[in-house]
Image: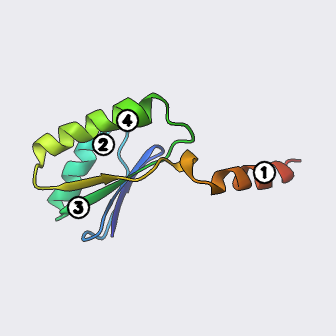
Amino acid sequence: MSLYKNQSVNLVSSNVHSWNWPSLELAIPSISEGVTICVQKGANSITVLPYFLATWRHVAVDIPEELGKAMQLHPQLEIKVAPYLGSANEISSILVSLSKQAA
C-alpha cells in the first residue's frame, strides 16, 4: 500500500509501497502532482483520504478540481474518494475524550 499524504489529503494505492503527502495550498507537490508520483511508482488505483473536520471548500471544491486534473493526465487510473475525516462517527467521541484531558 502506498500513502501519499500531507496535513489535508492522503492518496492510498494498493499496489505501491511508499508514503507520500500532497498539498492543496502554497506547497508542493499538489494533489495532482502527488497522483502523478504514485502513477510513476506503479499505482493503478488510488483512494483519496481527506484530512478535514468539515466539508467546506477544500472537500467540496478544491479536492475534486485537483482530482479532475489528475484524471485528465491519467485516464487509466482508478481514483476513489473516501469520506472526509470529520464525517466519521468516532470523531465526536475523540473530541470528548480530548476535552477530558484538558489541564
Distance between the Cα atoms at labels 2 and 1? Answer: 32 Å
User: Which is more foreground, mark 2 or mark 3?
Assistant: 3
Q: Which residue is mark 3?
A: 45
Q: Secondary structure at mark 2?
A: helix
Distance between the Cα atoms at labels 4 and 1? Answer: 29 Å
Q: Quadrant of the N terminus?
A: bottom left
Disc 4 + disc 3, Cβ < 8 Å: no
Q: Is residue 87 above or below residue 63?
A: below
User: Which is more foreground, mark 4 or mark 3?
Assistant: 3
User: Which is more foreground, mark 2 or mark 1?
Assistant: 1
Q: Which residue is mark 4?
A: 24
Q: Earlier in the sequence, mark 2 or mark 3?
A: 2
Q: What type is the residue that disc 3 sits on?
A: Ser
On the image, the x and y values in percent for residue 14 come to: 29, 69
Q: Which mark is residue 42?
A: none
Disc 2 + disc 4, Cβ < 8 Å: yes
Q: Which mark is residue 31?
A: 2
Q: What type is the residue that disc 2 sits on?
A: Ile
Q: Tell me if residue 48 can be seen.
A: yes
Display colour scheme: rainbow
Q: Residue at x 46, y 43 (%)?
A: 8
On the image, the x and y values in percent for residue 28 come to: 32, 39
Q: Which residue is mark 1?
A: 96
Q: What type is the residue that disc 4 sits on?
A: Leu
Q: Residue at x 37, y 35 (%)?
A: 24
Q: Earlier in the sequence, mark 2 or mark 1?
A: 2
Disc 2 + disc 3, Cβ < 8 Å: no
